Image (cartoon, coloured by chain):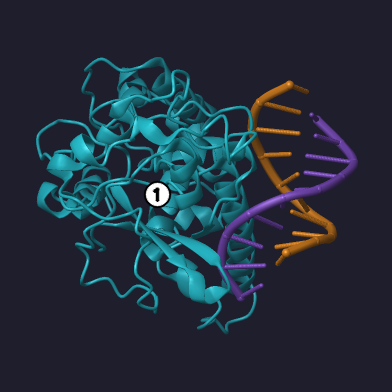
Chain colours: A cyan, B orange, C purple
Amino acid sequence: MREDDSDWFARWEEELPSPEELMPLSQSLISPDLALAFDIRSPVHGNGNSGQPHHHHQSTPPTPSQLQLPSSQANSSAEFAADSADLGSGAAGDEPARTLKRPRLVWTPQLHKRFVDAVAHLGIKNAVPKTIMQLMSVDGLTRENVASHLQKYRLYLKRMQGLSSGGGAGSDPATDRLFASSPVPAHFLHPNRVPSSDHFMPSFVPIATLQQQQQMAAAAAAAAAAAANPHLQPPQFHHRQIAAAHFGSPTNGQFNSPTSNGQFNSPTTTNGKFDPSFLARQTQPLHRMSTPSLHSPVGNYSEDLESANANGGRTVLTLFPTRDD
DNA sequence: TGGCGAATAT
DNA sequence: GATATTCGCC
């Protein structure tokens, strides 16, 4: 239990998907409605994940609007046809984008893992929806999504505590499958006693490429968290931690400015079009380097979008990583 | 105000 | 049951 620091970090890094694995997938969490609203033709998944246990999604073929193309061409052809026409007029009428309902987010074990990682890095005490969301840097993921999940997770933790300290019976099969899929960091269960004096909240790669302010916010939060933690205060806490700054910025800006209601980052519609980088980003796999480079705190995710019409028209969004552990 | 968390709704 | 939405509070 000594080399924990570097050890777990190394392992953690190991789990990250490799470039190849990320390659095939592309766009991220944009609901069909949203995509429609913005005239975005998402370069949808080529479904590179044959191995995903996944859900029993029935074979409902994707809507015509989402044909997939090779990521290479994705932005050339699948782009946002500026054509559409009616973002601000015609059928749409008002502000569909704001009114449209997002599909239900499905928390896959992988997505949940990312969530747990984020919470672990922040420390339970400092883990709040917004920050968690930022650390996870899964675009399209909203604060509400996280808040809701967090609420439930806390309940789960509470139950766990009760069990571990009180009765013996454990294992709640069906119910907690999701949560059980990701190990609960020890200190989660004992907010009181802190792990002697080490790990958790690793000093991320000190890399210092240019980082944007947005991330600084996250970093600041992290730093604050660190500062708030007594056991981190000691001599150990130095410049290192602060370096955590480049949190979620893989290749090119990754953050979305949370709009008023924390919605997703909308490709600015300002001029009828939006920044291509919006789509471009994440399309490029983060290099999973072993060298000091950066990647987001947690792996990289892509998303699988499925419309389950059979469900009575319910659309479900499934985020999934390109690989599980 | 924005954001959190608990309660409540779907 | 899982997720979303609402609502009171800070």
Other residues around mark 1 within 10 Å, as few (<14) / some (14–19) / many (≥20): many
From the top left corner, tell me how far across and down residue A148 is, in percent.
Answer: 62, 53
Q: Residue at x 17, y 45 (%)?
A: A71
Looking at the image, residue A100 lies above or below residue A246: below
In this rendering, would A293 be left or right of A171? left
Farthest front residue? A90
Q: Identify the image quadrant of residue A144.
A: top right
User: In the picture, which quadrant includes the C terminus of chain A?
Assistant: bottom left
Q: Identify the image quadrant of residue A180.
A: bottom left
Q: Secondary structure at mark 1?
A: helix
From the top left corner, tell me how far across and down residue A288 is, in percent.
Answer: 14, 42
Residue bearing mark 1: A117
Looking at the image, residue A192 lies above or below residue A265: below
Looking at the image, residue A267 lies above or below residue A288: above
Q: How many marks?
A: 1
Nearest to the observer: residue A221 or residue A257: A257
Nearest to the observer: residue A206 or residue A94: A94
Nearest to the observer: residue A250 or residue A309: A309
Looking at the image, residue A197 lies above or below residue A173: above
In this rendering, would A300 be left or right of A58? left
From the top left corner, tell me how far across and down residue A157 is, in percent.
Answer: 58, 62
Q: Residue at x 30, y 50 (%)?
A: A302
Q: Residue at x 51, y 24 (%)?
A: A224
From the top left corner, tell me how far across and down residue A62 is, in percent.
Answer: 35, 64
Q: Can the viewer see residue A288 in this picture?
A: no
Q: Identify the image quadrant of residue A306.
A: bottom left
Chain for disc number 1? A
Q: Can the viewer see residue A256 in this picture?
A: yes
Amino acid at dot 1: Asp
